[in-house]
Image (cartoon, helix red, strand yellow):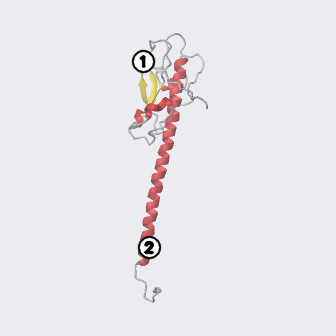
């Protein structure tokens, strides 16, 4: 049964079919846009996790380094040394667990080593381009504008009181923020 148009003529055939096709196309475009937004939100969350986990490793390496008894400070030989410090007679943990790399999903971190082959930092080996390109804290200003996650390196650099580094790695002091005057 044909439905007549307001002017009395029959409605052209295929009108409903074109309407359904148009609705499917709009639904597909909406789902594609939603998928893109979701993917971006997930990558931003993984970046935030990488910044948190990288900082946890950097701090744990620093605690390990500072816990060295005697005059010669050392970095850990393996990441597992951060879980249980082999130099101590009792259980000393500088890190609660070994974290997975949130970008690659693996336990294979890139390791930054000193001249004695000890670990002084970690990085994500991914060659993906980070979404976050600016507005890092003072400590991670070097991350701004980097092309790959592999360029985000979490390195513990001890503050040096004497000009000679103890591990063969040049140690530069961490910049301290200057307080702004109150008005």
| Viewer-side label of 1, 2 | 1
- The correct choice, above or below, for 72 with respect to 20 in the image is above
Give the residue at the far front of this rendering: 183
The dot on residue 113 is: none
Question: In whole angstroms, how far apart are the C-alphas of marks 1 and 2?
Answer: 69 Å
- The correct choice, above or below, for 135 with respect to 5 in the image is above
Residue at disc 2, secondary structure: helix
Query: Badge 2: how crowded within 10 Å, few (<14), some, or many (20+)?
Result: few
Residue at disc 1, secondary structure: loop
Whether residue 99 is visible: no
- The correct choice, above or below, for 131 with respect to 26 in the image is above
Query: Badge 1: how crowded within 10 Å, few (<14), some, or many (20+)?
Result: some
The residue identified by callout 2 is 19
Which quadrant holds residue 124?
top left
The dot on residue 170 is: 1
Please provide percent x and percent y for residue 130: 43, 40
Residue at left offset 54%, top offset 26%:
178
Q: Quadrant of the C terminus?
A: top right
* Mark 1 / mark 2, whichever is N-terminal: 2
Please provide percent x and percent y for residue 90: 60, 18
Residue at left offset 56%, top offset 24%:
94
- The correct choice, above or below, for 3 with respect to 133 in the image is below
Residue at left offset 42%, top offset 26%:
112
């Amino acid at each position: 049964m044909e439905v007549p148009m307001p002017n009395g003529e029959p409605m052209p055939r295929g009108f409903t079919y074109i309407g359904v096709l148009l609705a499917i196309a709009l639904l597909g475009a909406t789902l594609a846009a939603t998928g893109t937004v979701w993917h971006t939100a997930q990558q931003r969350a993984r970046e935030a996790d990488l910044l948190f986990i990288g900082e946890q490793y950097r701090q744990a390496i620093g605690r390990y380094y500072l816990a060295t008894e005697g005059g010669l400070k050392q970095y850990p030989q393996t990441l597992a040394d951060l879980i249980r410090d082999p130099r101590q007679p009792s259980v000393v943990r500088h890190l609660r667990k070994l974290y997975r790399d949130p970008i690659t999903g693996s336990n294979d971190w890139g390791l930054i080593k000193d001249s004695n082959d000890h670990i002084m930092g970690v990085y994500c080996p991914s060659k993906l381009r980070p979404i976050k390109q600016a507005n890092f804290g003072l400590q991670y200003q070097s991350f701004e504008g980097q092309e790959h996650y592999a360029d985000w390196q979490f390195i513990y650099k001890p503050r040096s009181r004497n000009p000679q580094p103890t591990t063969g790695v040049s140690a530069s002091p961490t910049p301290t923020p200057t307080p702004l005057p109150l008005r």
